[in-house]
Every structure is written in C-alpha cells, then in structure tokens.
Image (cartoon, grey):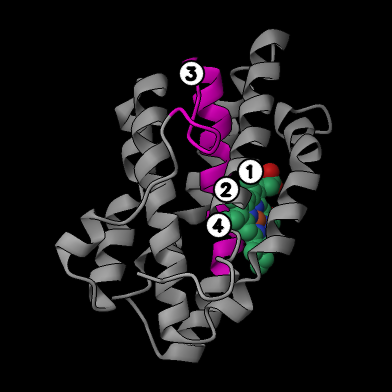
Amino acid sequence: MGRDSLHARLRTATGPAHQALEDSLDWRARVATLPGYRTLLARLHGFHAAWEPVIGAELADDAFLAPRRRLALLAADLQHLGLSPDAVAALPLPMLGGREGPILRGPAAATGALYVLEGSTLGGKVIGRHIADLHGLSGAGLAYYRAHGPAAGAMWATLRARLETFADDPAAEAVLTGAAVATFAAMRAWLSPAPEGAAGP
Ligand code: HEM
C-alpha cells in the first residue's frame, strides 16, 4: 500500500468509524453462546439482504461482486444453527431508503460500501477462529466468518486495486469515502446489541 494510495486515505478517513463499530459491537459477549451467535448472524443477514442488491445494482459488475456476496453464507449458517428457510426469509431488514437503509448512487458509492463489507472479512478471521474454538464449528455454521478462506489475500488485493481506479477523480473519491463512512455508521446502528429483553430470532 503506497503512502498516497486512495486506500491509505480511505483507511484513515474511516478509522474512527471502524473503531466505533468495533467498540459497540461487543462481539465476544454476543458469540459466547450459540443462541447469541445466531442472533448476531440474523442481524448480519438483514444487513446483507438490504445492501447486497443495492451494491449490485449500482456497481453493475456482477463478475466482481458475485464471489463477494455473503448473504447465502449467512442463510446456510443460520439453517445449520436451526432456523428454517422460512424463518431466515422472514428475518428483519434495515428500512430500505430509510434512515438505516442503503442510499447509494453509482459505482463509486457502491465501491465504498463494498470496501466496508469486504473489510469485515479481515476482522472476521479473528472472530471466526474464536467461534470455531468456542463452539467446535468448522465449515458448517461458520461459512460467513470463513468468508474467502485461503483466497482472502487475493480477494482483498483485487478490492484494493479496484479502489485505486477512482484515485484520479476527487469527486468520485469523495463519494466513495462518504459511502464507506455511511455504511460503517449504518452497520453500527443495525448491529448494536438489542436492548435488554428484546426478542431474538
Ligand atoms: C462488522 C463489523 C466490521 C466491519 C464492517 C469492519 C471493517 C473493516 C475494514 C473495512 C477493514 C479494512 C481496513 C483497511 O483498509 O485496511 C478492516 C480491517 C480490520 N478489522 Fe475490521 N471491521 C469490523 C469488525 C471488526 C472487529 C470486531 C474486529 C476485531 C476483531 C476487527 C478487526 C480488524 C482488523 C484486525 C483489521 C486489519 C486486518 C488486516 O490488515 O489484515 N474488525 N475492518
């Protein structure tokens, strides 16, 4: 990563949003039990169900997006953990076009949002290893956090290279960065632990 890369600037610009999300996620406590882990996956399912189609429409590059979609992995994990396909389909989504829903226009914005979703696979490696050790899961039930597996490095490298295609266009970079920050904030709002007594899936 060069000092002047768009990626370097983006990482700096989104650093506080990443930290805020990490702080409020409370993931260790939430995955400590299998029902808690399942509830976290259910929230992630809602987020991906709302954002992946919008990213797909605005990016208009299925070849690039297809291997990065993780909604089906979430559905498979949730079914492994006991939810029926109907129950998975009925899980709540962030409001579309509402305060928490995705509003992305064009490929730069879609790329900024995708940066956040793909970046979550990096921290996800730590979380996945923790869940595997704690609950004895290997493949089934852990597909979302295993994500790209051994291809992770290559997948992240091509995402970073894609970011740099916007580097000569300051307006596009501003849109991309704004979308990434907004995606972090929306994720934080959607994934923050439910208030005491709220129903799980
Ligand atoms: C769902 C919530 C999360 C999202 C959306 C997210 C997003 C991201 C993004 C976009 C990056 C890339 C930063 C870069 O440009 O280099 C990243 C990296 C990273 N995240 Fe997160 N993150 C999340 C949760 C976490 C949590 C809970 C942890 C703590 C275990 C974590 C630890 C890390 C680490 C260690 C890296 C750097 C990995 C590396 O450089 O190899 N993240 N994350």
In three-dimensional space, the C-alpha distance between marks 3 and 2, rounded to whole angstroms, equals 20 Å
Circles 1 and 2 in contact, beta carbons < 8 Å: yes
In three-dimensional space, the C-alpha distance between marks 4 and 1, rounded to whole angstroms, equals 10 Å
Residue at label 1?
Answer: 184
Question: Which quadrant: the C terminus?
Answer: bottom left
Q: Amino acid at mark 4?
A: Leu
In terms of image quadrants, where is residue 87? bottom left
In-image side of 24 versus 15 (left or right): left
Mark found first going from the N terminus, 4 or 3 = 3
Q: Per the image, is 164 magenta? A: no
Circles 3 and 2 in contact, beta carbons < 8 Å: no
Instruction: Tally the marks.
Output: 4
Residue at label 4?
Answer: 191
Q: Residue 187's mark? A: 2
Q: Secondary structure of the magenta portion, mostly?
A: helix
In-image side of 12 versus 145 (left or right): right
- Give, as a single range, the part of the protein colored magenta: 97-125
Circles 4 and 2 in contact, beta carbons < 8 Å: yes
Q: Amino acid at mark 1?
A: Phe
Task: Tell whether circle 2 marks a residue whose Cβ is less than 8 angstroms from ligand 1.
Answer: yes
Q: Residue furthest front?
A: 197
Say above or below: 162 vs 127.
above
Say above or below: 132 vs 115.
below
Say above or below: 137 vs 10.
below
Element type where label 2 sits in the image: helix
Residue 112 at x, y percent in the picture: 58, 30
